[in-house]
Amino acid sequence: MRIRDKLISTKVLAVCGLAAIAGCGTCKKETAEAEDTMPVFITGKIADSAKYESLHPRFAKAFAFMRRADLAKLKPGRYEIDGDNMWAMIQEAKLTPFGDVQRTEVHGKYIDIQAPLDGPETIGLLKLDPKERAALDFDEAKDYALFDRKTRAYTFLPGDFGVFVPPYGAHAPCKSLDGATHVKKLVIKVRK
């Protein structure tokens, strides 16, 4: 079974206007893929994360870390998983209101896996097309480009996770739709 078939059969994503949102039901059922090997976004429940491990050789270790019983008790900081290939960060993040335009980021070398630990976090989602991506001022040393763009709001709750896959899976993290001002969250960086 090809990855594309696996993605469609597990309903990883649907393409929805500006963004891809799992099971939104308001758009055509299509898989948004980056370079024909990975979706640009994956959303799911941590409890069900094992079913996504086959999508990338490093995902099994990443999701195992995410399923740690003590995850919510970890102090902010960096946690090694596999050297420069993969590490986790626990962050205390300030949330800002989700507006018409968000400060959006996209990466090049690393996939982001993010999960709120103690409250909701809204993340703006945006699928870039190759021409948009090529036009960005990319900082290779920091592995990101930052830009302002309209995105589609997706709210993650504790127990949820999102995967943002370069080069086209742009995201605007640390937003709020309900007035919340902070969240403790997990970010795992996974080398493509």
Image (spheres, helix red, strand yellow):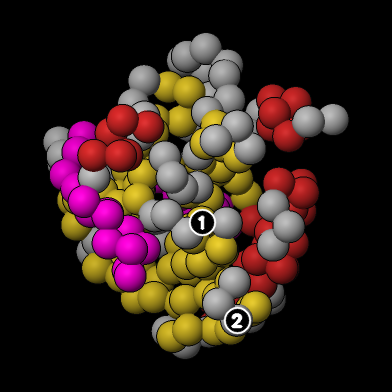
Q: For residue 5, what is the image quadrant?
A: top right
The residue where tag 1 is placed is: 111
Q: What residue type is labelled 1?
A: Ile
Rendered location of residue 93, percent (x, y)? 31, 70
Q: Does the magenta stretch include residue 3?
A: no
Taking the image as shown, residue 17 lies to the left or right of residue 62, namely left
Say if residue 84 shows up in the picture.
yes
Between 56 and 20, the one lying in front of the other is 56
Circle 2: is it few (<14), some (14-19), or many (20+) Cα within 10 Å? few
Q: What residue type is labelled 2?
A: Gly
Q: In this view, does 71 lie above or below 98?
A: below
Residue at (62, 49) in percent of width and height: 45
Q: What element carries label 1?
A: strand
Between 107 and 17, the one lying in front of the other is 107
Q: In this view, does 118 lie above or below 57?
A: below
Identify the magenta region: 137-162
